């Protein structure tokens, strides 16, 4: 799959809880992956087959009734009035920024500690990403630093609900209202999360979801959605995802081809039936890790008391991170570093003029973070095994 190597493989070959032969030692070793797409597939294969057949019979492969139903289901789930299905989470961000009128010379405030797409989309529109450091405990944007980053050119703020936990949206919206800025939530990792009882994606002007296969609600390919309570905003997105076309070959805007496939909608509709249970399973796994790691010298995730996280990732901060990662791999445990290089240090953003030291919390997190398997197919004994491997690493050295 043409995705950066740093992202977890989405090929379904990863397994968990199964025992594999360790050829060198001739022993049986646990294999616990970051994902278990095969396990998910076992729960959804048959209804998906039936849905795909219906699409084949209808021969409407792009947009159509399945996409419309998905838009209704996902927007209702997220307590938004509208959903606009698009071709990826990246395109959701791009389309939402276009709908907000962001363009050349504008500035958009966001976090440097996120997946590349968040800032990449800002740049692609000729606007400038303006980074603000993160909170040390939640990894989300530090709202107290936003006002100092606002200039007359600032148009929007993109808070990212990283690893499944919402940023401090009330504070962000107060600042945004005061300066007349649009707030676009990056909800790629947080479908179903709540902030003060409200759903992620319903808190700003619009939310952008990703249905990449590794996400809490993942398709069998690329997909995304813009969710919003603003009808006019949704209407603009509907046009923008189809080259800005308002009628046959009449184009109101220069948009793009951001349309969602019917096949993906079928998969996602079936998986929607499992989303709450799968999110709850992630939360149970996370709680178990936190219990098991209580006496281990790593920092477990901190969730604010007004937030419910859906644990897209269970991220610990640890000393000797790379050695721990190797130790876990040697014990058959997959883990990931999200993200190893903050965005202000990426080569493609060199012209923005940032240097190392500008966002120290993001830089420290990049050096110390490690994400453990937390997917819904994980069993309690798998969590215990991973936690014990970590405890063993720090006991021995
Ligand atoms: C925070 C964040 N934003 C945006 C995206 C982009 O989504 P997609 O991969 O569907 O384009 C992702 C997905 O990796 C993400 O994690």
Image (cartoon, rainbow, N blue to C red):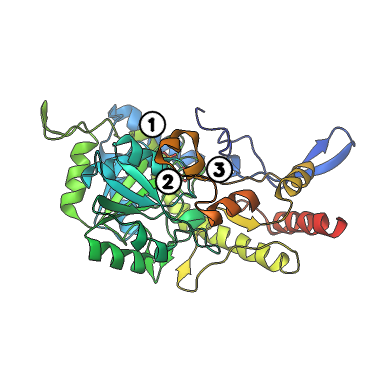
Determine crowd level at label 2: few under 14, some 14-19, many 20+ residues with C-alpha closer than 10 A. some
Say which quarter of the image contains residue 22: top right
Q: Nearer the viewer, mark 3 or mark 1?
A: 3
Earlier-in-chain disc, 3 versus 1: 1
* Residue at horizontal 57 percent and vertical 58 percent from the top: 282
The reply to whether dot 2 and dot 1 touch (C-beta < 8 Å) is: no
* Residue at horizontal 20 percent and vertical 56 percent from the top: 230
Lateral position of residue 397 relative to residue 324, left or right: right
Q: Nearer the viewer, mark 2 or mark 1?
A: 2
Ligand 1 sits in which quadrant? top left
Q: Which residue is mark 1?
A: 53
Lateral position of residue 232 relative to residue 169, left or right: left
The reply to whether dot 3 and dot 2 touch (C-beta < 8 Å) is: no
- Residue 183 x, y percent position in the rendering: 29, 56
Q: Could you give the CA–CA distance between mark 3 and mark 2, rounded to whole angstroms?
A: 36 Å
Q: Which residue is mark 2?
A: 270
Q: Which residue is mark 3?
A: 341
Say which quarter of the image contains residue 151: bottom left
- Residue 175 x, y percent position in the rendering: 30, 65
| Residue 42 visible, this orientation | yes
């Amino acid at each position: 799959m043409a995705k950066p190597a740093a992202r977890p493989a989405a090929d379904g070959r990863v397994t968990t809880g199964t025992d594999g032969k360790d050829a060198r030692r001739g022993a049986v070793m646990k294999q616990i992956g970051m994902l278990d797409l095969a396990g998910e597939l076992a729960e959804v294969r048959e209804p998906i087959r039936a849905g795909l057949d219906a699409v084949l019979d209808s021969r409407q492969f792009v947009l159509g009734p399945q996409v419309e139903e998905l838009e209704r289901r996902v927007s209702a789930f997220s307590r938004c009035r509208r959903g606009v299905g698009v071709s990826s989470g990246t395109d959701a961000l791009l389309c939402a920024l276009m709908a907000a009128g962001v363009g050349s010379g504008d500035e958009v405030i966001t976090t440097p500690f996120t997946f590349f797409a968040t800032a990449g989309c800002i740049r692609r529109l000729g606007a400038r990403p303006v980074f603000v450091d993160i909170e040390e405990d939640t990894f989300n944007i530090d709202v107290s630093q936003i006002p100092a980053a606002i200039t007359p050119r600032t148009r929007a703020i993109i808070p990212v609900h990283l690893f499944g936990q919402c940023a401090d949206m009330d504070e962000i919206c107060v600042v945004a209202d005061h300066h007349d800025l649009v707030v676009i939530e990056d909800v790629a990792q947080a479908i179903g999360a709540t902030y003060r009882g409200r759903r992620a994606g319903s808190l700003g002007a619009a939310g952008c979801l990703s249905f990449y296969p590794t996400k809490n609600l993942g398709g069998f390919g690329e997909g995304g959605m813009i969710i919003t309570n603003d009808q006019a905003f949704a209407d603009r997105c509907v046009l923008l995802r189809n080259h800005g076309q308002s009628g046959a070959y009449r184009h109101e805007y220069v948009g793009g081809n951001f349309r969602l496939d019917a096949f993906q909608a079928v998969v996602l509709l079936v998986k929607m039936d499992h989303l709450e249970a799968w999110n709850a399973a992630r939360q149970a796994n996370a709680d178990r890790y936190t219990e098991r790691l209580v006496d281990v010298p790593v920092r477990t995730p901190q969730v604010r008391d007004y937030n419910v996280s859906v644990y897209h990732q269970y991220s610990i901060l640890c000393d000797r991170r790379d050695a721990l990662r190797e130790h876990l791999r040697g014990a058959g445990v997959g883990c990931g570093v999200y993200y190893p290089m903050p965005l202000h240090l990426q080569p493609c953003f060199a012209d923005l003029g940032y240097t190392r030291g500008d966002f120290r919390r993001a830089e420290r997190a990049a050096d110390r973070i490690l994400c453990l398997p937390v997917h819904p197919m994980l069993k309690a004994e798998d969590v215990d095994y991973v936690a014990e491997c970590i405890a063993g690493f720090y006991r021995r050295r």
